[in-house]
Image (cartoon, helix red, strand yellow):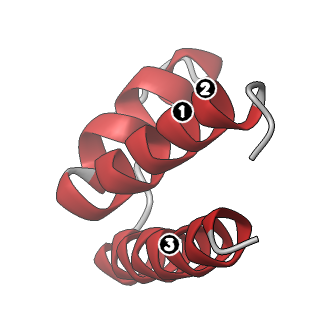
Amino acid sequence: MHWFMIPFFIVFFGIALCNVIAPEATWRRTRAWQYKNPGAAEPSAAAFKVQRISGAVAIVVGVVILVVTLSR
């Protein structure tokens, strides 16, 4: 495994884990600043569920890539 992939995986898993654990907080930190009234522009519960699911999928894909990379 190349040395530069380790920081990439740490950041990747950190972002994906934040999306799984607290998608609302992730939205507030990354997107809410774009709106004059962030409370009125907050995404729906379904959008947060999709964000949570995509974070879980990203973790699974990241683990598979990590295992494949380490097995070489």
Residue identifier under label 1: 11
Q: Which is more toward the observer, 33 or 30?
A: 30
Q: Which is more toward the observer, 26 or 62?
A: 62
Query: How many numbered marks does the figure carry?
Result: 3
> Of the numbered discs in the image, which one, if any, rests on residue 7?
2
Whichever of labels 2 and 3 marks the residue nearer the N terminus, that label is 2
Characterize the local packing of mark 3: few (<14), some (14-19) or many (20 or more) Cα atoms within 10 angstroms. some
Q: Position of residue 59 (x, y in %)?
A: 46, 70
Residue 41 showing in the rendered view: no
Q: Are marks 2 and 3 in contact (CB under 8 Å)?
A: no
Question: Disc 2 and disc 3: Cα gap in Å?
Answer: 14 Å
In the image, taking residue 70 as reference, residue 32 lies left or right, namely: left
Q: Quadrant of residue 70?
A: bottom right
Residue identifier under label 3: 63
Q: Position of residue 17 (x, y in %)?
A: 32, 53
Q: Residue at x 73, y 37 (%)?
A: 5
**Kind of residue sitting beneath label 3:** Val
In the depicted structure, whether residue 68 falls above or below residue 34: below
